[in-house]
Amino acid sequence: MSIHHNSPGTGHHGLPCAENPILRHLESYWQSLRHARHIPARNEIAPQGIDAALPYAFILQRVGPGVARMRVAGQKIHELLCMDARGMPVSVLFAPNSREQLRALVETAFTQPAIVAASLISPAQKFRPALSGTLLLLPLRDENDQTSRVLGALVSDGATDDRPRRFDLAPGRAVRIDTLAITLASSQPAPAPADVAPQKQRPDVVRPALRLVIDNG
């Protein structure tokens, strides 16, 4: 896995998500919320801004080093997993041999904090063609001004079927990491203990602004 670090203002031509209009739109919207270079807040995200990215989008909550759960997720994410994605770790979208690399990228997005984008591949199997995709992670602030949330999206280029898809990081493709030029209000909070009370681990309360992102069933 090669890493491409960008300084603010440098170009991204040829890097993951650079040519994808859905992901470009999602990142442009996130950038538009960066008042005075601060990271946008989770409660600023509205469906009219996300637009076409809604089916592919999710919001992660950090629950430990490199570990994050999907608190809301779009319909395309449900279809990739063939199940309701809410509450599931984002690692469930990845093959076991790629999960350590994913953990490192997720932790980078939260703690540097940084924009992270990576090219993905779901290898071909019997009667199933290969499926390529792109992952984008954009940090968000919570109510305590910590980057414990991430606005993300996974866009793939083919049809899903009735079996779950798992992705690997695409070999030979650069991973984009743009460290953000900000100073956090304070250090990142310690991960919640495994036996934390259930009410503290529940998915985010669904705000009206995000009703289009999730499948309420």
Image (cartoon, rainbow, N blue to C red):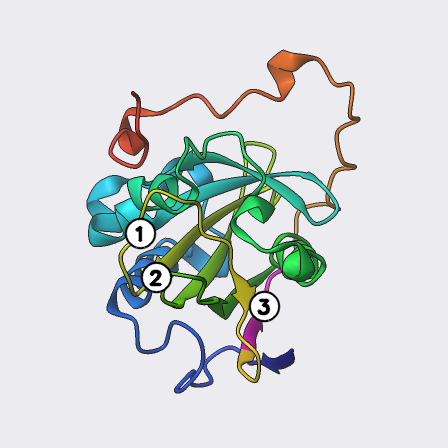
Q: Which mark is residue 64?
A: none
Q: Tag 1: residue type? A: Thr
Q: Where's the N terminus, which quadrant?
A: bottom right
Q: Give the range drawn in magenta.
A: 175-182
Q: Which of 172 and 203 is in front in this view?
A: 172
What distance separates the C-alpha of mark 1 from that of mark 2? 9 Å
Q: In front of the other: label 1 or label 2? A: 1
Q: Which of 176 and 207 is in front in this view?
A: 176
The residue tagged 3 is 181
The residue tagged 2 is 156
Q: Where is residue 95 in the image (x, y as percent from the top left)?
A: 59, 56
The residue tagged 1 is 160
- Can see residue 112? no
Q: Which of 16 and 5 is in front in this view?
A: 16
184 up-or-down from 216: above or below: below
**CB atoms of marks 3 and 2 within 8 Å:** no
Q: Where's the C terminus, which quadrant?
A: top left
Q: Where is residue 151 in the image (x, y as percent from the top left)?
A: 45, 48
Q: Position of residue 21 (x, y in %)?
A: 25, 69
Q: In front of the other: label 1 or label 3? A: 1
What distance separates the C-alpha of mark 1 from that of mark 3? 38 Å
Q: How many marks are shown on the rendered structure?
A: 3
Q: Tag 2: residue type? A: Ser
Mark 1 is surrounded, within 10 Å at the Cα level, by few (under 14), some (14 to 19) or many (20 or more) other residues, namely: some
Mark 3 is surrounded, within 10 Å at the Cα level, by few (under 14), some (14 to 19) or many (20 or more) other residues, namely: some
What distance separates the C-alpha of mark 3 from that of mark 2? 30 Å
Reading the chain from its start, which is encountered first: label 3 or label 2? 2
**CB atoms of marks 1 and 2 within 8 Å:** yes
Q: What element carries label 2?
A: strand
Q: Residue furthest front?
A: 126
In magenta stretch: residue 158: no
Q: Is mark 3 on a helix, strand or loop?
A: loop
